[in-house]
Amino acid sequence: MEDPMSVLDDIVAGVRIDLAAREAATPIADLRAALADVDPPRDPMPHFRAAGSSVIAEVKRRSPSKGALADIPDPAELATAYAAGGAAAISVLTEERRFGGSLADLRAVREAVDTPILRKDFIVTGYQLVEARAAGADLALLIVAALDDSELTRLHDMARELGLTVLVEVHDEAETERAVALGAELIGVNARNLKTLEIDSDVFGRLAPLVPDDRVKVAESGIFGPQDVQRFVGEGARAVLVGEALVKDGDPRGAVAAMTGVEA
């Protein structure tokens, strides 16, 4: 059985191996050159700051905690349904080993929708940020637990220079303090502990008061319907990131619509 304390470390180790292969195949200079042909990044923040809940709807085939979630032969079709349901942004898992995603999924979604797109991955180098922008992403995820302070600051600054909106993800008090000190505008509180994979639905309510009200707070994990959204909005969330519940729903458009605009 896998040592639960090694889950995040193991994922990042695999990410670094796959990243090295991509870097060898495509130099960062080539990626930067490709940026000239990419549309300007879309800004999701006005939607996130608007009244009622915003939904970041996720394209997610599987996860380390639940295994296979959904067969998604056409990510673009799913993303189109999300957009039609009113998603404020669409998150695309691009990590392959544990989540079954790819940058090809992100590019397919980009071609299908005008909605802002989040590259959801374990980003540990600037190369991945340039990759994200070159593939058409508008947002990138930085996980505080996977980065030391210097890495977090460097990657956050680089992402902003590229025009990416940064979702900075936290899991506990110390990480939340680091995200706030960083100046992160968009802070996601993940109820799933990435070291143990356990969900604690009380984490958002505990950490949200540590985040200044001028930042946008996002509730992540453990969200399965409008009642969950209402709870987190009541605790200060402006947006919710939802994956499993949406990919398993037979009506993803309707499911997103039901979670959008919810007030406390």
Image (tube, rainbow, N blue to C red):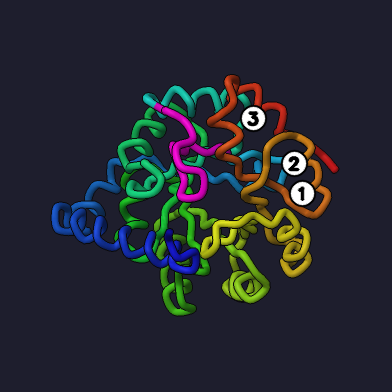
Crowding at dot 3, Cα within 10 Å, few <14 / some 14-19 / many 20+, comes out as: many
Q: Secondary structure at mark 3?
A: helix
Give whichever of 6, 48 is nearer the camera. Answer: 6
Estimate the spatial distance between the alpha carbons at disc 1 and disc 2, rounded to whole Å.
5 Å
- The earlier-in-sequence mark between 2 and 3 is 2
Asked whether the beta carbons under mark 2 and mark 3 sit within 8 Å of each other, the answer is no
Q: Which quadrant is home to the N terminus?
A: bottom left
* Tag 3: amino acid: Val
Asked whether the beta carbons under mark 1 and mark 2 sit within 8 Å of each other, the answer is yes
Q: Secondary structure at mark 2?
A: helix
Q: Which residue is mark 2?
A: 229
Give whichever of 159, 172 is nearer the camera. Answer: 172
Using the image, tell me which numbered label, if any, was put on residue 256.
3
User: Magenta stretch?
Assistant: 57-72
Give whichever of 76, 6 is nearer the camera. Answer: 6
| Residue drawn 40% across the image and 34% down it | 110
Visible in this render: residue 133? Answer: no
* Tag 1: amino acid: Phe
Q: Which residue is mark 1?
A: 232
Residue 166 x %, y %: 51, 57
Give whichever of 80, 175 is nearer the camera. Answer: 175
* Tag 2: amino acid: Val
Q: Which quadrant is home to the C terminus?
A: top right
Visible in this render: residue 119? Answer: yes
Crowding at dot 1, Cα within 10 Å, few <14 / some 14-19 / many 20+, comes out as: many
Picture quarter containing residue 10? bottom left
Asked whether the beta carbons under mark 3 and mark 1 sit within 8 Å of each other, the answer is no
Residue 30 x %, y %: 18, 53
Estimate the spatial distance between the alpha carbons at disc 3 and disc 1, rounded to whole Å.
16 Å
Q: Secondary structure at mark 1?
A: helix
Membership of 65 in magenta stretch: yes
Membership of 162 in magenta stretch: no
